[in-house]
Image: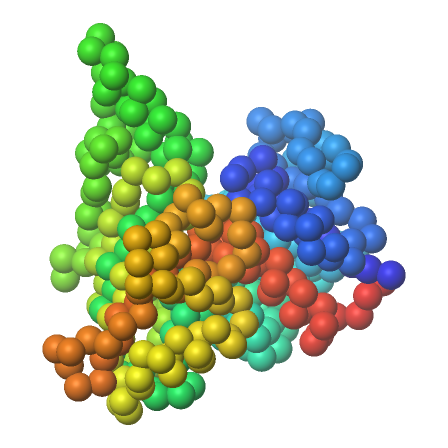
Amino acid sequence: MGYRIVVAGATGNVGREMLNILDEREFPVDEIAVLASRRSLGTEVSFGDRTLKCQDIEQFDFAGWDMALFAIGSEATKIYAPRAARAGCVVIDNSSLYRYDAQVPLVVPEVNAAAVDGYARKNIIANPNCSTAQMVVALKPLHDRARIRRVVVSTYQSVSGAGKDGMDELWDQTKAVYNPTAEVPPKKFSKQIAFNVIPHIDVFMEDGSTKEEWKMVAETKKILDPAIKVTATCVRVPVFVGHSEAINIEFEDFLDEEEARDILREAPGIMVIDKREPGGYVTPVECVGDYATFISRIRQDSTIENGLNLWCVSDNLRKGAALNAVQIAEVLGNRCLKKG
C-alpha cells in the first residue's frame, strides 16, 4: 500500500530530480502522474525503469491524489496549488510563493519536521530556498547546543539554481571564450558568468540587499529561530551544480571547534569531511548527486568571543530542492496521511 503522487513540472531540472529521488528512496508509490505545461504534453520522463508521459497540468484533476510535488515556479503555483489543495491533494511547493505565509509550514525535515503537522490549514507545505536549506541543516544542531546569536554567510551558488537557461549560458559562454569569433552576451545573468562571479541573485531591494539575501534571513528565522540575526551576501559562480557557503556563527555560549565537529558528525543529513591538509574538504563538484550536506573547515573565530567558521556544500538540486521535497513527503506520510 502506498500513495497516489503527482509531480508537477516534471520536465524541469528539479522535477526530474524529484522523480529520481522518489525512486531511489523507494517512496511508497501506488500511482504516479507527471504534469507539465501544455507545450510539453506527451514529453517522456523517467521514473525508475518506467517511462511516463507528461499530462497537461491545466486539464488535470487532482481529486483522489494524496500529494503533489510542485516545481513549476510561483506564477503557475498561484493558479494550480490552490486547485490541488481544494481537491484534497496536499501540495509540497518548491517555489517561493507560500514560504512567508504564516498559515503554511516551511519545512526542512532535519530541522523542524513537526511543523508538517500544520499542513491542514491550507493543504500546502513550502520548501525553502536552496541556499537556506543546507545552511539550517548545519546550524540546527549547533543552535541546540550553544544558541546562535548571529550568522554572517557568503554564498557561492551554482548556475543550476537559475534553471536550465543558466546552465546553458555558462556552457555557451565558456565555449565562446576559446572561440574568438563567437560572442554570447548575458541573457539569464546580468553579466558574463563564465570565468566570473556575480554578486547579484534575484532582484535588488530598497536596502541594497537582493531578494535572495532577504530570503535567507526570513526563512532562517521562520524555520529555526526568529531571534537569530542573519546577514547574507549571495554570489553566482561558474559552477554547474552545487552551492557552497562560508558561514560565520556567533553563539551565546562558547562552543569549542572539536565539540562542534563531534556534534555535526552525529547530526542527521550532515557529513563532516574536515582534514587540515590540501584536499581535506569538500567542493561542489564532489557533492553532486549526494543527499548529504557536507561540512568542512570548522574552526574558531578569534575576532569574537563565541565564534565559529565553517564551510558548507550541498547539491542544490537535491537537498536544496528535490530531496527536501521528498523528505517532506516522507514525514507527511509517516505523521499525517494514511497509505492507500
| Residue 299 placement (x, y as % from top left) | 27, 72
Please say if 123 is above or below 81.
Answer: below
Most distant residue in the top direction? 181
Residue 105 position within the rendered picture, expressed as x and y whole percent measured from the top left: 52, 71
User: What is the x, y in percent for residue 166?
Assistant: 36, 34
Q: Is residue 211 left or right of residue 284?
A: left
Identity of the residue drawn at 44% across and 74% down: 264
On the image, which quarter does residue 155 sit in?
A: bottom left
**Could you tell me how many numbered marks the image carries?**
0
Q: Determine if residue 61 is in view.
A: no
Identify the residue at horizontal 31%, vertical 86% (top origin): 255
Residue drawn 80% across the image and 49% down it: 31
Return the residue nearer the eye: 289 or 35. Answer: 289
Q: In this view, does 147 lie to the left or right of 32?
A: left
Give the residue furthest to the bottom: 253
Q: Is residue 260 visible?
A: yes
x and y, in percent, of residue 11 in the image: 58, 35
